[in-house]
Amino acid sequence: MNTWRVALFALMIVFCQGVVVGVADDMTFGFDEDKDGNGIPDPWTIGKGAPEKSVSLDTSVKKSGKGSIRLEDASESAYVVVRHMVDAKPNTAYRLTAWAKTDETAGPTAVYLSEYHAPGKGRGLLKLHVLIIDQPREWKEFTKEFATTEKTGRITIELCPVGFAIMYTGTAWIDDVKIEEVQ
């Protein structure tokens, strides 16, 4: 009886560690729902700024699924970052893929990947990766490969409106953001 309980406890520990530490082999974010009605696709959140000026779920322009995220021009006072955090494995190669389309943009849109420690394992930014989405008038795929550090436990994906700090004009749509392990 005690052996059975120990085995069950060990299995629960292994299962829980897998949930906390790793990501699935790939994660795709399609910007299809806004259940809370805040105008931002679930499960994304606004990191800074005023979403009503720069970010919205667009169901009329999309690569696939029900919608895309629309990033519009913004002044420096309306600087916006849309973000989503996912668990990641340390010392692992990943590929970020995103589809984008633009209209009347004068500068690039950026996707930032920020690596952080696993919860309870440290604090602060470990590494930053940038995927520049530059002037695709029609839907175009962009990719960026990167490797996590030995301390990485989480990755924050941040979408920045057109031009980022310089704040150019125009509109960009992003859809089908995917992170997958590179074998």
Image (cartoon, rainbow, N blue to C red):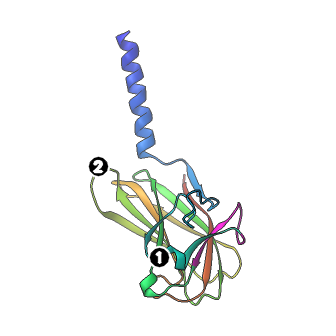
Q: Look at the image and give the residue range highlighted in magenta.
A: 60-71
Name the residue at 43% across, 59% down.
155
What kind of residue is marked 1?
Ala
Q: 62 or 146, which is in the foreground?
A: 62
Label 1: element kind: loop
Name the residue at 64% across, 88% down.
104
Residue receiving disc 2:
120
Q: 162 or 46, which is in the foreground?
A: 46
Measured Cα–Cα span from mark 2 to mark 1? 31 Å
Q: Residue furthest front?
A: 37
Whether residue 64 is visible here, answered yes or no, is yes
Q: Nearer the viewer, mark 2 or mark 1?
A: 1
Q: Residue 182: image x %, image y %?
A: 54, 55
Q: Main secondary structure of the magenta part?
A: loop
> Is residue 65 in the magenta section?
yes
Disc 1 crowd rating (10 Å Cα; few below 14, some 14-19, many 20+) is: some
Residue receiving disc 1:
50
Name the residue at 44% across, 34% down.
15
Disc 2 crowd rating (10 Å Cα; few below 14, some 14-19, many 20+) is: few
What kind of residue is marked 2?
Gly
Residue 150: give its label. Answer: none
> Is residue 150 in the magenta section?
no
Q: Residue 166: image x %, image y %?
A: 46, 88
Whether residue 132 is visible here, answered yes or no, is no
140, above or below 154, in the image: below
Q: 126 or 43, which is in the foreground?
A: 43
11, above or below 115, in the image: above
Q: Residue 169: image x %, image y %?
A: 56, 89
Asked which quadrant contains residue 21, the reply is: top left
Asked which quadrant contains residue 36, the reply is: bottom right
50, above or below 98, in the image: below
